[in-house]
Amino acid sequence: MKYALALVNIKGLGVKTFSYLIPDGMNVQIGQAILVPFGRQGLVNAFCVGFSDYLPGDFKVKKISKILDEKPLFSIDYLKLLEWVANYYCCDLVTVLNAAIPLKLIEKASKVEQNVEFITFDGATKRQREVLEILQKSGKMPLVMFEKQAKTTRLTVKKLESIGCVKITAEELYRNPLDILNITETEPLFELSPEQQKVYEGIKEKLCSNKPILLHGVTASGKTEVYFKLIDDTIKSGKNVLFLAPEIALASQLTKRLAKKFGTRDVAIWHSSISDGERYDVWQKLYKNEIKILAGARSAIFAPLQNIGLIIIDEEHESAYKQTSPAPRYDARIVAKKLAEFHGCSLLSGSATPDISLYYKALNSGNLFELKNRYNDAKIPHVSVINMQEYGRAAYRSIISKPLQTAIIETLEKNQQVILLINRRGFSTFTQCQACGHVIECPNCAIPMIWHAKDKRLKCHYCNHSEYFPDFCPQCGSDALKNSGTGTQKIEQYIKELYPDKIVERIDSDILVRKGEHIRLLERFQKKEIDILVGTQMIAKGLDNPNVTLVGVISADASFNLPDFRASERGFQLLTQVAGRAGRGDFSGRVFFQTYNPEYYALASAKAQNYTEFYSKEIVAREEFDYPPFSQIVRLILSSENNFRAEKSAQEIALRLCTMIEKYGISERIIVLGPTSCVIERIGGHYRFQIIIKNKLDEKGHRFISSFLSKITMPKDIKLTIDVDPLDIL
């Protein structure tokens, strides 16, 4: 090929691809780091992502200056996966490359090769200190300084060496994030119970078919131990394993468990919070096939793990696997299915409350396995439903019922711990004028402002706008403004009032200012340093604390009241998962659901911890209204600062699409709904209209829709957002 397509990160332009002439005698490969000229910026780092024999138009093309690293960082097969992602999620390849390949890899490609770094404790980050301390304990006694500091210091390399320094390259410094665990010996795998053994053997037989498999197990049934046994088999067969968890904190906990079972040398972690040096080093090891088990969050699906024999998705029902913004709006679960096809391996998903669509497909394909009992026959916690229509008046501040208060006291007297869930952050969820009824809304978004008592500010949770509490109502001028609704901050305050001698902490996205604060709080809770933990849905995910015997859900109705077809499913999953945090040890657990609608079918199923009962009712409604799994949803959002322009553009696109569908006679198989105003009509000053497309033609329908969307050209003042398989339609 004559020309190479280079992926470049240019300041002010972002990530772009440009064509460069390949000099005679230079053998450039896909995935290699290269040095290319770019205008006034001079030579910049880039990656080769493609080739061509000719260029359209008459261009003066510059030459590639140098190959920085002979060893490629990704392969042609890897690019094929990214190309599939771009086609499926209706975006360009550069957008996917930007999401998949960390930009710092481009910068590191030359720095590691050219520079030997010396690092001192002075000015070192916490992560660097941890690594240096490990090296110090090993007897190397490193004293090093950063590259930026090297320009001002007078110490020479010889001087540093004479006082006991050791030369450490960046690659050597950032070996493996798991080094700080100091794990020297591995632990044996747990012996499986008869039920686990039966499920393990059944799954092992199905792995040969390379089909998606679902492991549905009640909370604390020991799904992870089954995973570990299958991982052990896969590694012994010479293959590698990709293990996904929904969030960074859970991925970190999972990686520690994997390292203790399989050793730190064969295990690596991948998520957006590991450092650039760690990411670069792990990436190279993955591509060189030096890692056997990669654990990570959503973005780990794009890590270049080689020779994959098994992909595991734990807590597969979690919405965190879907990236909602920015593009590509990919779902790691769907990409994992395609990745498994590329590698000819099986995809194993597990959950106590699996996604309705996945359960339907697994049930009908014979690839469903179930663990119906908790490990060691531990009892499922007893669930009580508190009807707040009866108990609300006598409740503390009309929020915390008497039965829940009594249960908290009884639990704390036994030196056991409590979890309280309220899936709303902030102090109050809206501020209303008692004189005219006006609700204070965000000036940029069509939603109420949330009062945050600690910051003493009204905040918008969509655009981050904040303002001081007004003295008077902007509508009528009255001073009768009142905060209403309940958030985590309010519950935290009320619990501290009720139990002043107990340690109460709150965990939600507002307190995660410092990196790793979530993990630190959970570790304190695990060590029994916290008596009562108040939080949002964060506390319903993967928390395994045997000393937790009481879980209280303050407003069990909250998730059911959203105008979305998945609202009942999301609410059922949240209640079931948080209930599963209680009674995971030697003590029996209790759960309290406070509600104003105790007869609602999803809440009744959550009380009984009966997924099958919920599924049987939910699937009927899905089929009646052609929602997944009986169709694929594609959501189009047209937004603009001009309300009329946004609506007009949405109407034109819907009309053109309906005309095309009628022309091909597929109106019964591809259904167009709208355009209508989005439930949240305005966000960030932009008015929003949506078109919902229900595709009942599978891949053919998806290709038809993608082809139609690829031909749309939008005016500069109109933004078109394409969301394939959206999590919600709000």
Image (spheres, grey):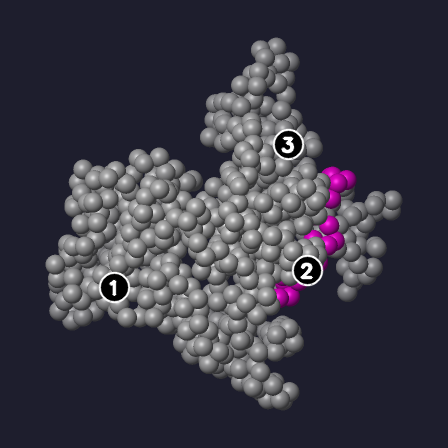
Residue occupying the far front of the picture: 194
Q: Is residue 301 visible?
A: no
Question: Reading the chain from its start, which is encountered first: label 2 or label 1?
Answer: 2
Q: How dense is the environment of label 3, judged by Cα within 10 Å: few (below 14), some, or many (20 and up)?
A: many
Q: What element does badge 3 sit on?
A: helix
From the viewer's perspective, tell me whether residue 658 is left or right of residue 253.
Answer: right
Q: Is residue 352 visible?
A: yes
From the viewer's perspective, tell me whether residue 464 is left or right of residue 310.
Answer: left
Point 36% across, 65% down: residue: 605
From the viewer's perspective, tell me whether residue 208 is left or right of residue 529.
Answer: right
Q: Which residues are magenta?
A: 68-90
Mark 2 is on which residue type?
Ser
Q: Which residue is mark 2?
A: 209
How far separated are the C-alphas under marks 2 and 3?
A: 40 Å
Q: Which residue is mark 1?
A: 595
Mark 3 is on which residue type?
Glu
Point 61% across, 45% down: residue: 231
From the viewer's perspective, tell me whether residue 103 is left or right of residue 644.
Answer: right
Q: Nearer the viewer, mark 2 or mark 1?
A: 2
Q: How dense is the environment of label 2, judged by Cα within 10 Å: few (below 14), some, or many (20 and up)?
A: few
Q: Nearer the viewer, residue 497 or 42?
A: 497
Quadrant of the image occupied by residue 279 = top right
Point 40% across, 44% down: residue: 544
426 shown above or below 713: above
How far separated are the C-alphas under marks 2 and 1?
A: 45 Å
340 shown above or below 717: above
Mark 1 is on which residue type?
Thr
How far separated are the C-alphas under marks 3 and 1?
A: 55 Å
Point 64% across, 32% down: residue: 171
Is 84 included in the stretch rendered in magenta? yes
Report the quarter where the C terminus lies.
bottom left
